[in-house]
């Protein structure tokens, strides 16, 4: 199917069965070649097959349904969970000359009716809809009267109760197979462990679908997990040292912490804005738009923010609180570096995070099985936090993928030391037992270090035989010991007494001296030199090229402002960096730059060449 573009910039369909996916990839999207399994997926779905696609964020999932939509007769229906994601993807497709639209609650009745009419008349290539609207009787009737190319179910992990972002409305999507059995379906997600994959297949009736699992590795992301001490100060140091002026996301567990952290960063010179579900909807939308459209904004948010964000140049994702699972951590950190350029995933983690997450699980209203699975997932995440080995290896292993040490995570760059902590573990566990398994780490450390506080004397703990037996270790060392005891399963938070630590059955051999305990020695990371100015590919740019890149970004920002779209919809940073480095001599050379398809070349070519040679 070839796209003949109209004067308005949208496209008109004309069939040519000899046109192959690679040609469309080049002429419309401006990419010279497929990545990984993209071509196999495109050809399978374009041929009418169902598919489940697991591909990391930034790996090119969208192309896996956008190209088949252009290769097949009719309109592709894309199920998308968030309005912002629909709008940005539609804007990007329209820039390419593709007839795309969205149908959601932001449209008034007249606009929605016009969109439905266009669908019935075959005037759309792709239509993005929310799952709630898709299963409404009116919408199903409209689909029955339309020529459908395929159904694409994005963020398919939302269908699973074991997924990190379960959405009940996704459970209704099996109706697509029941009502339209001959229309191919492609379900896509960036994160799904084996258990979640099985449930996606079952819930969506994808039993005969071909499963494509790409590597979960995001080699451009550097993973760093630090011992939480003064978390905000640690975050500020990380931003100033590595990402001054960069776009980033900071995740916090509570709305209050989001507001306080954003205000604190602003007071220290960081362009930070808050985002959470408790904000006024207009203010929340404005902050999301600012993050999408402005350069160098840091958004501090709860996990309500992110799934609908398609911004490719997020240079870091930071966590001030522990996520619930590796799936959640992977999904959230994957929002950094979607353009393939170097990015950071940074997290501050401490015992309080573990206690808080265990308490939330124990007090949840879910079934016993749900709580059991949640604990297992949390333990896997703690294993990632506490590992002395390569974090990337541990992360990939969770998703069933093997790999060699990456050389690019904090543990590979500065391998942590380990020590025989058996004696310290026995002292700590004994202290938990002797004090009645009713106190948290702060009090236990006071007892171990022999500190005479009002609380210690009130409970008579200065008279215990464990009082002062840990004076050889400082407070920070004991804090690490207790955190790792919980992570290793020798102690657990008591859900009936907030913050209190209890013994587990596995602690018995340690207390009896029958089992050795090895722990990570948490040492301060060495200070790093400030990063040089880099282009989107990560290479240091010469001053002249850096100057041209700034001009190109300013031009792009003005184009985005006039058109009312995010800057990355016009061109990605990576494309502008390549233009600055290559300095194409003419329109043909400019057309060879990745990310510049025929429509964009026609629309922006003259302006870009004028900037390059002006």
Image: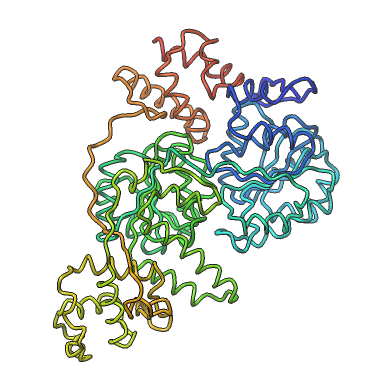
Image position, residue 401 (x, y; %) = 54, 47
Residue 230 relative to residue 496: left or right: left
Residue at figure coordinates x 40%, y 80% from the top left: 494
Q: Nearer the viewer, residue 279 or 166?
A: 166
Residue at figure coordinates x 31%, y 55% from the top left: 226
Residue at figure coordinates x 65%, y 49% from the top left: 104
Residue at figure coordinates x 83%, y 38% from the top left: 147
Q: Nearer the viewer, residue 440 or 601?
A: 440
Is residue 107 visible from the viewing direction of this image? Answer: no
Seen as rendered, the residue at the extreme top is 585
Image position, residue 196 (x, y; %) = 62, 58
Tell how many labels.
0
Residue 218 relative to residue 298: left or right: right
Q: Quadrant of residue 1?
A: top right
Is residue 78 visible from the viewing direction of this image? Answer: yes
Image position, residue 303 (x, y; %) = 47, 57
Q: Is residue 171 above or below residue 292?
A: below
The quarter in which the C terminus is drawn is top left
Q: Is residue 285 above or below residue 18?
A: below
């Amino acid at each position: 199917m070839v796209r003949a573009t109209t004067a308005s910039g949208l496209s008109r369909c004309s069939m040519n069965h000899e046109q192959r996916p690679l040609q469309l990839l080049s002429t419309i999207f401006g990419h010279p070649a497929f990545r990984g399994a993209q071509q196999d997926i495109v050809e399978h779905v374009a041929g009418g097959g169902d598919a489940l696609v697991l591909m990391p964020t930034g790996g090119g999932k969208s192309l896996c349904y956008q190209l088949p939509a252009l290769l097949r007769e009719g309109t592709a229906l894309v199920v998308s969970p968030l309005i912002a994601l629909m709008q940005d993807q539609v804007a990007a497709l329209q820039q390419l000359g593709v007839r795309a639209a969205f149908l959601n609650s932001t449209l008034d009745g007249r606009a929605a009716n016009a969109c439905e009419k266009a669908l019935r008349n075959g005037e759309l290539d792709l239509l993005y809809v929310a799952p709630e609207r898709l299963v409404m009787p009116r919408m199903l009737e409209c689909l029955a009267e339309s020529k459908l190319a395929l159904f694409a179910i994005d963020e398919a992990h939302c269908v699973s109760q074991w997924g990190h972002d379960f959405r009940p409305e996704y459970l209704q999507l099996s109706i697509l197979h029941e009502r339209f059995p001959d229309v191919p379906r492609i379900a896509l997600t960036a994160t799904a462990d084996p258990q979640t994959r099985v449930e996606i297949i079952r819930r969506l009736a994808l039993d005969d679908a071909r499963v494509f699992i790409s590597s979960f590795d995001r080699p451009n992301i550097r993973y760093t997990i630090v011992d939480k001490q003064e978390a905000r100060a640690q975050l500020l140091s990380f931003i100033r040292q590595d990402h001054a002026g960069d776009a980033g996301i900071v995740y916090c567990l509570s709305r209050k912490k989001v507001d306080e952290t954003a205000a604190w960063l602003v007071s220290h010179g960081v362009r930070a804005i808050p985002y959470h579900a408790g904000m006024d909807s207009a203010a929340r939308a404005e902050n999301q738009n600012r993050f999408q459209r402005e350069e160098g904004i840091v958004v501090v948010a709860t996990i309500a923010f992110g799934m609908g964000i398609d911004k490719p140049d997020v240079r870091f994702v930071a966590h001030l609180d522990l996520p619930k699972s590796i799936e959640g951590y992977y999904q959230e950190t994957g929002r950094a570096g979607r353009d393939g350029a170097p990015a950071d995933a940074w997290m501050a983690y401490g015992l309080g995070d573990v206690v808080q997450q265990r308490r939330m699980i124990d007090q949840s209203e879910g079934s016993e099985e749900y709580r059991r699975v949640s604990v297992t997932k949390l333990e896997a995440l703690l294993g990632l936090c506490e590992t002395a080995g390569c974090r990337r290896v541990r992360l990939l292993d969770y998703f069933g993928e093997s790999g060699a040490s990456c050389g690019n995570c904090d543990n590979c760059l500065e391998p942590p030391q380990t020590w025989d902590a058996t004696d310290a573990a026995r002292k700590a566990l004994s202290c938990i037992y002797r004090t009645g398994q009713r106190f948290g780490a702060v009090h236990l450390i006071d007892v171990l270090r022999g500190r005479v506080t009002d609380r210690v004397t009130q409970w008579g703990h200065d008279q215990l035989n464990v009082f002062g037996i840990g004076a050889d270790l400082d407070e920070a060392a004991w804090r690490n010991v207790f955190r790792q005891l919980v992570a290793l399963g020798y102690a657990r938070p008591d859900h009936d007494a907030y913050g209190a630590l209890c013994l587990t059955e596995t602690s018995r051999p340690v207390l009896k001296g029958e089992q050795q305990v090895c722990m990570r020695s948490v040492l301060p990371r060495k200070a790093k030199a400030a990063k040089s100015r880099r282009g989107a590919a990560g290479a240091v740019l010469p001053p002249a090229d850096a100057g041209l890149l700034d001009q190109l970004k300013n031009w792009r920002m003005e184009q985005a402002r006039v058109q009312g779209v995010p800057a990355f919809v016009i061109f990605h940073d990576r494309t502008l960096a390549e233009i600055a480095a290559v300095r194409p001599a003419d329109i043909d050379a400019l057309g060879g730059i990745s990310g510049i398809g025929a429509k964009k070349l026609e629309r922006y070519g003259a302006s870009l060449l004028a900037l390059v040679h002006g």
